[in-house]
């Protein structure tokens, strides 16, 4: 057994993106657990296996509290914390509370806000308008309906069917809410992973690219797979998580 797969004390906390759930990490979590790793894949309120709790009142802060609670109740320490896509917003907010329990942050093709920004601020006006219109037409004006996995670059028919059977709606409020302070995320050792080709607009990654060029605590990597890398190339994701674990 090599160093990358040997059991150790570093836990991995894997947070999903929008309209997904903890289920999307199944392949990555299986590989990590086969190597003796402690893995947590929380699902945010109203999504995935918690979709029965969907309501208009759920906002970004609800999801931040979800992640903070996972760290608190599971007593997680010295973790590699991973946020995918929308999950980057949640990770950024939670870091204001749990940064002393996190060894390294990994942002997997994720949104990375600054103080006071929302998902829609990062998406841009045209994308925000399109999502709002989608909610108005198909989500009673308060939720965004489930997405199709093919939008995220998943091409295998079986994988698309598997993911689509688990995709759920998400409250519009989570995309509209502005985050509070973000200093601790931006000061923490971390890695940004860009998936190529990505379904994210290029400007969403500009902050991470700028930081990778100027901040020695931040490492920038490119992964040749879909936006849903945990589904389409779980082995490559695991390799990057082990690299991130050993950055500091």
Image (spheres, rainbow, N blue to C red):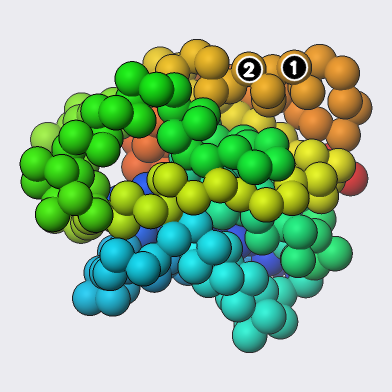
Q: Which residue in the protein does label 1 denote?
A: 210
Q: Can you give x and y, in whole percent of width and height, for residue 2 in the image?
A: 71, 50
Which structural element holds mark 2? helix
Query: Residues at badges 1 and 2 in contact (C-beta under 8 Å)?
Result: yes
Is residue 97 visible from the viewing direction of this image?
A: yes
What residue is at 54 percent from the left and 16 percent from the top?
203
Is residue 235 visible from the viewing direction of this image?
A: no
What residue is at 51 percent from the left and 29 percent from the top?
122
Closer-to-camera residue (178/53):
178
Q: Is residue 219 above or below residue 24?
A: above
Query: How many numbered marks appear?
Result: 2
Looking at the rendered image, the quarter that the C terminus falls into is top right
Q: Which residue in the protein does label 2 denote?
A: 206
What residue is at 65 percent from the left and 31 percent from the top?
192
Closer-to-camera residue (69/181):
181
Q: Can you give x and y, in whole percent of width and height, for residue 223 in the image?
A: 53, 24
Neighbourhood count class around disc 2 (C-alpha, 10 Å): few under 14, some 14–19, many 20 upward: few
Q: Can you give x and y, in whole percent of width and height, for residue 137 in the image?
A: 9, 41
Determine which quarter of the picture holds residue 115: top right
Determine which quarter of the picture holds residue 37: bottom right
Which structural element holds mark 1? helix
Is 16 left or right of 32, judged from the image as shown?
left
Q: Is residue 150 above or below residue 116?
A: above
């Amino acid at each position: 057994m090599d160093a990358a797969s040997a059991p150790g004390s570093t836990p991995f906390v894997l947070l999903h993106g929008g309209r997904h759930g903890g289920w999307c990490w199944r392949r990555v979590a299986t590989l990590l657990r086969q190597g003796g790793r402690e893995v947590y894949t929380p699902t945010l309120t109203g999504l995935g296996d918690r979709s029965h709790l969907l309501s208009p009142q759920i906002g970004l802060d609800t999801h931040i509290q979800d992640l903070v609670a996972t760290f608190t109740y599971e007593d997680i320490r010295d973790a590699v914390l991973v946020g995918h896509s929308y999950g980057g917003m949640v990770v950024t907010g939670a870091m204001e509370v749990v940064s002393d329990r996190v060894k390294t942050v990994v942002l997997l093709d994720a949104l990375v806000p600054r103080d006071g920004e929302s998902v829609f601020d990062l998406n841009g006006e045209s994308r925000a308008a399109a999502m709002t219109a989608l909610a108005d037409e198909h989500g009673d004006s308060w939720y965004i309906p489930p997405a199709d996995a093919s939008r995220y670059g998943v091409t295998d028919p079986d994988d698309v069917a598997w993911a689509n059977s688990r995709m759920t709606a998400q409250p519009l409020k989570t995309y509209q809410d502005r985050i509070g302070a973000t200093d601790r995320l931006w000061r923490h050792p971390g890695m940004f992973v860009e998936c190529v080709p990505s379904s994210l607009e290029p400007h969403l990654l500009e902050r991470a690219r700028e930081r990778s060029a100027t901040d020695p605590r931040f490492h920038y990597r490119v992964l040749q797979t879909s936006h849903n890398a945990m589904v389409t190339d779980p082995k490559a994701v695991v390799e990057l998580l082990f690299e991130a674990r050993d950055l500091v």
